[in-house]
Amino acid sequence: MKKIKYHILFIFLILVTLYSCQKNNLGNDYKNYYTGHEIVYTGAVANAVVQPGNLEIGLKWKASTDPSITKYVIYYNNKADSQIVNISGKADTIKTVIKGLAEYTYSFTIYSYDAKGNKSIPYEVNNAKVYGPIYISTLLNRGYNATNPYAVSKTGYVTLNFIQPDTINIGTIIKYTNRAGQSVQKVLSPDSSSITFPDYKGGTDITYNSSYIPDRNAIDVFYASKSDVFPKIDGSVPCDKSLFKKVKLPNDMNPYNSGTDIDRLWDGSTSPNGFPNLFHSDGANRLPQTLTFDMGKIYTKLTKVEEIGRNCCHNPDDFEVWGIADITNAATTLAPNDPGWTAEAISKGWKLLKEVKRTDDGQAPFKTDLDNNPPPVRYIRIRVKHNADGEGSYTNITQITMFNNVLN
């Protein structure tokens, strides 16, 4: 029994000796690493926000509460490049912009430093995208409404219509020339689908250029690489038919009955009508034959005429449109089918605005330009020379519409 106790005591002494040696070694290791002063870390960056730009990038973060920080250093390109942000006063947010970058996705490492050179633990910013020419080449100007690109009011206001923009669109710059010859610039916001100009000068170009941001935090605005030209604006607006009145000059056609007189020509119909909802002549004389009406005021820039025939027959396919400002002493004495009628009409001051020739059955709405540079006109005279079915005496017309340019 004593022998066993001696063995246990011997093992215990060996363990105590080994522990003492290890403790001495740990003390020596500590002395090897200890430099004589403690390691100090400055306040670290947190929650940095990336702000993409055009060949540049912005970085911002909340300022540290550590008052010892005197600067921040941002490393990138595998620490081959860096940017220093010096801290000169108290601020809530630290901001900087790194310029001269390529169109690329970068990683950044940010340290804070104090005046003694102590630094923070690193803060990594990854997948920070910088934009440039390649991105710009993908940008398109906001599309216009191809179905209804614009509207022109009777008072000369022009409204341009656009489709819904991309969510990153922040505006579209529109440039036009006003009636005073001055260049005007307006901005269409992304939440608006139309924009109106009260003073657009007809016949001049309207250009538009859209701007975008690739990210809501972006520090730069990017524009489509070139401006587009808006479709040409036709300033022709229908003359006010509420002012139109019947005029009966010598040898003009008579209606078939009181319900088919020429005031049917401005009742607002938009498609071929049947009897009696149209002008129907009595067919008493062979073509050519005339009818005359008063537009109620003088128009100085008549541009177009539209004619709609009957839904069956006796539709004009060859007719003349004449105009004059005042019918005092303007009545012709010759029958419209007299060979001398044209010369007499000219001698009375009438101006031929257009000879209209159709190649169809004369039913559908048919719009055509008048001859250029018309004189001031208030009174219109239609001289029907031929009808599409070759009948030769009757004339049927559903509607006549005159157009005036309100933009010049």
Image (cartoon, helix red, strand yellow):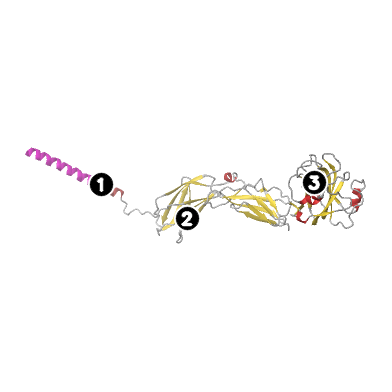
For residue 52, side relative to residue 403 (left or right): left
Which quadrant would the N terminus be assigned to in this image?
Answer: top left
Mark sitting earlier along the chain (3/2): 2
Q: Are marks 2 and 1 in contact (CB under 8 Å)?
A: no
What is the x, y in percent for residue 407? 74, 54
Q: Does 237 appear in magenta?
A: no
* Residue furthest bottom in the image: 89
Q: Main secondary structure of the magenta part?
A: helix
Residue at 65%, 52% (x, y): give it: 174
Tag shown at residue 26: 1
Q: What range of the chain is rendered magenta?
A: 1-26
| Nearer-the-camera pick, 225 or 80 | 225
For residue 145, side relative to residue 356 (left or right): left
User: Label 3 neighbourhood size at 10 Å, few (<14), some (14-19), many (20+)?
Assistant: many
Which quadrant would the C terminus be assigned to in this image?
Answer: bottom right
Residue bearing the label numbered 2: 85
Tag shown at residue 397: 3
Can you say whether 366 is above or below 177 in the image? above
Q: At label 1, which amino acid type do we have? A: Leu
| Nearer-the-camera pick, 183 or 42 | 183
Q: At label 3, which amino acid type do we have? A: Ile
User: Label 2 neighbourhood size at 10 Å, few (<14), some (14-19), many (20+)?
Assistant: some
